[in-house]
Image (cartoon, rainbow, N blue to C red):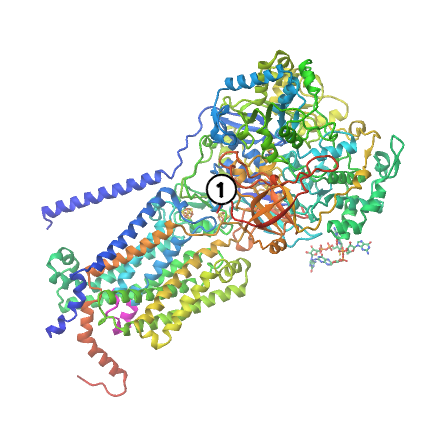
Amino acid sequence: MLDLERQDEEPLLAPIMHSGRGFWLLAACAGLLGFAGLAAWLVQLRRGLSVTGLNVPVYWGLYITHFVFFIGISHAGTLVSAILRLSNAEWRRPITRAAEVITVLVLFFGMGCILLDLGRPDRALFVLRHANLRSPLLWDVISVTTYLAASTIYLYLPLIPDVALLRDRLPRRRWLYRPLAVGWTGTPRQRRILHRAISVMAVLVIPIAVSVHTVVSWVFAMTVQPMWHSTIFGPYFVVGAIFSGIAAIILAMAIVRRAYRLEEYLKPIHFNNLGLLLLVMALLWFYFTFAEFLTTYYGAEPSHMAVFLSKTEGRFAGEFWTMIVACFVVPVALLARRRTRSTVWGTVVAALSVEIGMWLERFLIVVPSLSVPRLPMEAAPYAPSWVEWSLFTAFLAVFILLYAVFTKLFPIVSIWEVREGRERSVADVARRVKSYLPGRETVP
Amino acid sequence: MLSRRRFLGFTAGAAAGAALGGVAGAGLRTLFASAESPIVPPRGPERVVLSVCDLCPGGCGVRVRVIGDRAVRLEGNPLHPVSGGRLCPRGQAALQALYHPDRAEGPLRRRGPRGDLSSFERATWDEALGEIGARLAEIRAGGRPEAVVLVTGGGGAGLGPRVARRFLSAYGSPNDVALHRGDDAAAIALLLAQGVRAAPALDLQSADYVLSLGSALLEAWSAPVHATRAYGEFRRGRTGRRGKLVHVEPRLSITAASADEWIAVRPGTEGVFALGVAAAIVGEGLHAKPFVAERVAGLEEDRDAAGRTRPGLRSVLARRYRLEQVEAETGVPGDVILRVAREFASAGASLAIGPRKGPLLPGRLFDHLAAGVLNALVGAVDAPGGVLVADDPPLPPWPALPGGVSAAGRARPKLDGAGPDQPLLASDPERLAEAIRAGTPYRAEALLLVDADPAFASAAPETFAAAVQKVPLVVSFTAIPDDTALLADWILPASHFLERADLHTTPAGVPYPLVSLARPALLRPVRDARPTAEVFLELARRIAPDLAAALPWKDLDALLRWEMEGLHAARRGAVMGTAFDEAFVRMMEGAGWWAPGYRTPAELWTRAHESGGWWDPFYDHGDWRRVLRTASGKVELRGDLLDLAPAAPERDGALALLLFEPLPIAGGTGAELPFLQAILDPGHEAHWETWAEIHPETAARLGVSDRDWIRVESPRSSIVARARLTARVVPDAVAVPVGLGKRGGGRWASGIGANPLRLLAPARDPLCGLPDFGATRVRVARARPPDGSA
Amino acid sequence: MARWGMVIDLDRCTGCQACVVACQVENNVPPAGSRDAARGRAISWLRLVPLDGGREGHGTRPALRLVPLPCQHCDLPPCTRVCPVFATQKDEEGFVAQVYPRCIGCRYCTTACPYTVREFNWRRPEWPAPMERSLSPDVSVRPRGVVEKCTFCHHRLQLARDQARVEGRQLREQDYVPACVQTCPADAMAFGDLDDPRTTVARLARSPRAFRLLEDLGTEPKVIYLSKGEWGA
Ligand SMILES: Nc1nc2c(c(=O)[nH]1)N[C@H]1C(S)=C(S)[C@@H](COP(=O)(O)OP(=O)(O)OC[C@H]3O[C@@H](n4cnc5c(=O)[nH]c(N)nc54)[C@H](O)[C@@H]3O)O[C@H]1N2
Ligand SMILES: Nc1nc2c(c(=O)[nH]1)N[C@H]1C(S)=C(S)[C@@H](COP(=O)(O)OP(=O)(O)OC[C@H]3O[C@@H](n4cnc5c(=O)[nH]c(N)nc54)[C@H](O)[C@@H]3O)O[C@H]1N2
Ligand code: SF4
Ligand code: SF4
Ligand code: SF4
Ligand code: SF4
Ligand code: SF4
């Protein structure tokens, strides 16, 4: 019994107990890239947005692309984990935390992108002081902040029992774990409250998450600009967000599994199941994209067609068709077949392809509509500058670094939930499955 | 319970946090303090000064808003008959010229190699005038005053060039050479047809139908604001009467874009088209028969003074300009030619305009003569809506020129051979350049350049650049050192028009005599610059007493008073005024009265300065003795010359080079100002480079795509330009703007674009000897980008 | 209350661009260099846009139509709705105003404007000495990082109102004329109160030649164009 209780702790606490050369190397590299980004940002603060590749009429570029991209990825964690929790998907247990961390961290970067994009970041707080509630940008501010708060709580709650464990096992870091553990001892009452709180949060977080990406899409859809002003943009963005979010979970899991040798916990079946979800999202994404483009094509409004054609056969055709391949052809080819889906590399390649494709999708939503204004104007094509790119790599690097640091402070696989699964769920599931079957209930 | 230690720790943490936040906040604030431009607002009393724009020969009257020692705004003077309160983009940008950072600080003397601004060093005006004056005195004392050459450019009609030219004559040199002006060919056509040496003035606002034969009527016209105002009236100023504009040119110019109809002809066939129209009019007998019978000579066969028979234009038209022939040569369908002929002959007041394409591009005499034929056929000569001839303002004559060495020098042959060798030309600058280079018939020892940049803006820039280097003393009067100034020995900074008093006479193309007055808007010049006129007055005093006696004025003000007193003595005209005043003066003068609104010269001086100047708005139509000064006293149709249509180019695979002058940089100036560089071609955002318009079919044949860099190569030279594929130009031609490609001109002009004038073949207009700006054929191929461009 | 608007007669306009430069000079727009221009960063509150005029050839209309394009001061402006901080707003007299010290530079309004007439200060505006001496004291110089656009020369209304008040009289039609309108050599532009039937703009706006740009978007522009052509006022 004792062994069974302790069996998960060794491997899952190992990353917290000692850090290898790999971690420090990663930290150094990521830190370096982060500082490069900081330098780029200082340059931008000093010289204004002239250091970007933006122009008239392409007023928005990579920063807004990355805002949408990061907020999209943030749907990974919280939303997916909440859905899995509520639907009692037992296979979720080892993966929820890895997913939820992504959400919380990446939201900061999404908001950071907006800050980068402002001509006057020193006036950022004007959005609170002089808030115009009619502006979709303000809706964003509200829903993203709410989402961040909810996601943080939602990450924190299931962390409590594991923090308590760490408090007891690691006296040197009691200063950190003790306050966070809020006196958790694992009494049945505490457990009951915790379960209840997690369930409530899971229910709450789903509409918030859906609202976030809907509102992000409305930033575009509420204007009259060609190929932005679309009623399906809300659901389209939500689908895209979940799509890229799941891909992000797969990638994070694969890395954690490899780095911390957690093959026992993050098994091919997890990748297979997430792969199935990814496949469903790929089909959904394609459905929305198809619907969006087909209606534009049949409506054939000249200003809309100008944008349409710039994507399908014009200046952005390369990006557009790469996106179709990366978001649809590659994932469907890999994930529709069990042979490739049930392997880790199969889903990882599909997820990587989806991330690239979804980045392109975000870019193709932001830039082409601005590049072909209704009234003709001769303008230089938008080419992002080194500042924009280095801020992107810095964001990625610092995100990875923070994620790694999280794994050094907290178990990236929820110990107590896995244990709970071992202890109770097998029996629970057996009962549940039996209850679906014909025949009488067996009274225990 | 909060322990003391924890409380202290908490406080310290909070304090540290606050400090950190404070530092970050302060950092951000410093960073964003740099977002604001540190601008010191002008201080001091505010006043309005009347002046005259001289950024082009238009001479628009302007009002300047001055606060303290700064001029902060320029607008048109509403009482001024040329500007009427309006300004063109150049006039609007004039303050950028006044406060241009690259204006010469003061007189500059060359110490190092030619062609480089860093070779020059500051000198005082006293040094400059002392040295130049001594050298000029020496040449004159040596009995070679003819060795001093003055080249004037196409700038404003102010006192600077006038005083400089008088100075040269009094000094004793015949070598007063004006660079070609856009109005030259039209003026020669008028001389041949009407015996008057003047640029034609068009009564556009009274016309009903205008046939523009490749003219730049709505671009860099002689007085652009005046012409554009007239165009507005022509279109919609008269209730129920809208003028129609038909434009004939191989390129869809800005004028063509404003027209009701653009007729694309093959390059160089505008005149042939016009004569095709004339042939149809004469053939169908649609011409104004009474007018032609009474006032036109040369339509029918006749005898000249010597008794020889001259072929009539009618027979030339019937033989040489038959419909099929013209159709084949111009590429315009015969029914279009017929339709235009009928429209032209039947519209109320029709007017044909010759192909003056800008201050540097006069067009071919043949085409101007052809336009003149059309006007003569419909009676658009000195009639409302037709071609008018302006009277000169009655300014007093200047003191007589000295005799002695001065008279002897003036009697020497001109270096440019104009006059004896080229009877129709007053100046031949390209020939001058050759003569200076060759040192024949005599050596040029000093070259004075006033508003002239022939090493950039002439038909032979390279020849001029070489010629300038042969002259031991070259003095350039210019504000922002231009290409020729960089080759000079002295750069004498000319004042900006807002820094001096001035007097401008009637600009070309304006039909009434006028004298515009300017007061200095700034009491101290922005740079150590002087009015060119005053510099010449001073030089005259320094060189010799007889020279000083011919230019006896202490300064500009004294000269202005002399002029205005003479004007007062002429007893006609009025000070500029409102439309009501104008109508009143017209009515009175029409009835034979003089109602000037001033009595004494002092009153004229004050009132003219308050309104912007003096003018005589009364135009006496049909004063035939004034406007028809040919031997016959009639409009001469020159069938003999019109028989000689320019030959069609050989089909050698080369392209015709079509040059045009965008208004902002017309006349070879304007590229210095960033606001003008930004608007070279309306509707296009990307500027600051020389582009070449090519028809897509031609481009496809040459393997050139839109925005490719291409090399445009003529037998003489080559330039690199950005290809723009457009159906705005006919196939087998390439159209390139003139005005970019300067070496000098300051930070915004230097090294921007390329100068297509360098490509020009040394061809001459066979009928008059002007350079033929339309004869050059070029080859086009893809090229590498020029240095320093993306 | 007046509803200020502009009429641009394309039959008079020659595309000379005097209006473009007048606007830049009047409103202290900084000069751009070749680099700025090549990167689409040159600021101009008024541009000439080439509209497709159909096919070309003999006996047809020229294919190039140049349309001066200031801010249309839409009565239903898509730009003001999206501004998160009320830095751009339509005031009671219909001006779509821009508040520089409030603007956070998010450029949402610029992307929302279907006429693409909003400009952004990509860098700090600069005037190489002594060019700053030509700046007008009537218009503030914008800092880096904020959006700007045509104001209908609103400062001229304020100055004209002050002047009228000093002289103890009503504002007259000719008192308030924007810089572009004032300079137009072809007299192609008119400006005034669209709601006062006696004004020139109101009369011209009733012309059968009158049309507005992108009218189907429902932005209700207050810049009215008169097309080229024979008939009508
Ligand atoms: N888009 C459009 N189409 C229309 C109309 C419209 O309002 N808009 N209106 C319709 C109406 S009501 C009509 S009546 C028709 C008119 O249509 P058409 O009969 O085609 O009329 P037009 O174009 O005026 O002239 C026809 C041709 O006759 C030539 N012509 C002129 N005078 C003579 C002559 O003396 N002899 C000969 N042989 N030819 C001559 C002209 O140069 C022209 O090429 O168009 C109809 N079509
Ligand atoms: N300059 C010039 N003048 C011309 C001609 C030309 O070619 N050039 N052509 C001449 C010729 S051939 C003709 S036929 C005439 C045509 O001259 P008009 O008869 O004046 O013809 P339209 O200009 O077509 O205008 C007819 C009017 O009827 C209105 N209308 C349209 N449908 C209906 C309807 O169902 N019921 C009613 N009640 N009204 C309707 C239209 O809106 C318009 O106001 O013009 C002649 N005048
Ligand atoms: S037309 Fe000539 S004189 Fe008049 S404002 Fe323009 S540049 Fe000055
Ligand atoms: S100033 Fe007048 S004529 Fe010139 S482009 Fe502007 S509107 Fe047209
Ligand atoms: S034109 Fe554009 S900027 Fe001007 S009011 Fe309309 S939407 Fe706003
Ligand atoms: S850029 Fe300025 S004016 Fe435009 S939406 Fe943002 S805050 Fe408002
Ligand atoms: S109204 Fe004023 S601000 Fe607007 S375009 Fe005209 S000059 Fe510029």
Q: How many marks overall?
A: 1
In the image, residue A275 above or below residue C76? below
Q: Is residue A89 magenta?
A: yes
Position above or below: C1 against B630: below
Q: Residue at x 73, y 49 (%)?
A: B330
Can residue B53 be seen here? The reply is no
Q: Quadrant of residue A153?
A: bottom left
Q: Which residues are magenta?
A: A81-97
From the viewer's perspective, is B590 left or right of B155? right
Q: Looking at the image, which is closer to me, B437 or A23?
A: B437
B185 and C185: which one is in front? B185
Give the residue number, with chain letter if any, for mark 1: C34
Q: Of the residues shown, which amino acid type is indicated by label 1?
A: Ser
Q: Secondary structure at mark 1?
A: helix
Q: Look at the magenta stretch and give its main secondary structure.
A: helix
Q: Quadrant of residue B402?
A: top right
B747 horizontally vs B299: left or right: left
Q: Is residue A84 magenta?
A: yes
